[in-house]
Image (cartoon, rainbow, N blue to C red):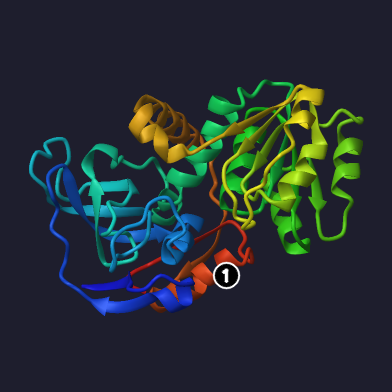
Amino acid sequence: MKAWQVRELAAPADALHQNDIPEPEPGAGQVQVRVRSAALNFPDVLMCQGLYQVRPELPFTPGAELCGEITALGDGVTDRNVGDRIIGMAALPHGGFAETALMPAASALAPPSLDDDAAAVLTIAYQTAWAALFRRAGLQPDDTVLVQAAAGGVGSATVQLAKNNGNKVIAIVGGAEKANAATALGADVVIDRTRDDVVAKVKDATDGRGADVIFDPVGGDAYELLAKCVAFEGRIVIVGFSGGRIQAPPLNHMLLKNYAILGLHWGYYQTMRPAVIAQGFAELSRLAAEGVIRPLISRQLGFEELPHGLTELAAGRTIGRLVWHPTS
């Protein structure tokens, strides 16, 4: 089968090599899956560079999130069938950027009424957004939500879920094209950080009070700006550091304003609180069936385009989600 493999740790354009390799055989508790659509995620970039907390042995096939069809069952798998369409996380080192991948049977889920591309991007971004808003931040009906990188994959999901909950949403983006995307998602206020005074705009939109819930997948300098925008007794949820620098926030500031800084490593729930993931998936499936979830997919990539797509994602030049097809 054809697959992209990381053979040395580097930026995606240098790390990824196209190879013909044997199809992986499912181990105990695993299923073999024909990949229909695989989503590009920032952790895929970090894994190419050896900077993610999960570090598969070389060589490996990245691609953490996918939609596919079961083609074989491993030992002990009794609640799945060959031919089932499923979504979820790949079992590395046999990730989704190949014609065939492996997935843990226990976490492979039947997708809701979405096409392959929309289903492929439902797991990481929407589960992260749901857990950040409702599990970690305890979102209340009258909370104002501030979303950093609101036109990105996880940011766009956060905007949709907060708006569906009836909350006022302030979106921060970089550039006019991303501002248009955030407006189309339903954000009440859109701030272009490349030309607007972010703090002044947030204060103006909240009558000087600040945002109750702040969603930050960027970190670094972006976080330091967001901390100036938090309301008294607000909550800042840290979900990543795509800006490249991990901030060291001054704790005296959070003490003075009585706000909380909350961390979210969504994948760790699979180990520590799997019921949370099941609850989130059930809620997201309901919203998808109701037509509330409309993933922002800006581009479908053919087989050869994967390294370029991950490079664009790493540079922050993408809008919404990119998906990859092994057969195009």
Q: Position of residue 159 (x, y in %)?
A: 65, 41
Can residue 40 be seen here? The reply is no
Quadrant location of the C terminus? Answer: bottom left
- Which residue was labeled with disc 1? 312
Neighbours of disc 1 within 10 Å: few (<14), some (14-19), many (20+): some
Image-based side of 286 in relation to 292, left or right? left
Along the viewing direction, whichever of 4 and 265 lies nearer the viewer: 265
Measured as percent of width and height from the top left, residue 196 is found at 88, 54
Q: Residue at x 89, y 36 (%)?
A: 203
Report whether residue 22 is seen: yes
Q: Is residue 278 above or below residue 239?
A: above
Is 69 drawn above or below residue 212 in the view shown? below
Quadrant containing the N terminus is: bottom left
Helix, strand, or loop for circle 1? helix
Residue 296 location, x and y as percent?
57, 53
Closest to the observer: 304 or 249? 249
Query: Up-down: is 153 above or below 97?
Result: above
Q: Is residue 52 left or right of residue 198?
A: left
Q: Amino acid at mark 1?
A: Glu
The residue at the point 28 percent across, 42 percent down is 108
- In-front residue for pair 164/179: 179
* Numbered-mark total: 1
Spot occupied by residue 170 in the image (x, y as percentages of width and height): 76, 40
Q: Tell me what residue is drawn at x 37 percent, y 59 percent.
A: 63
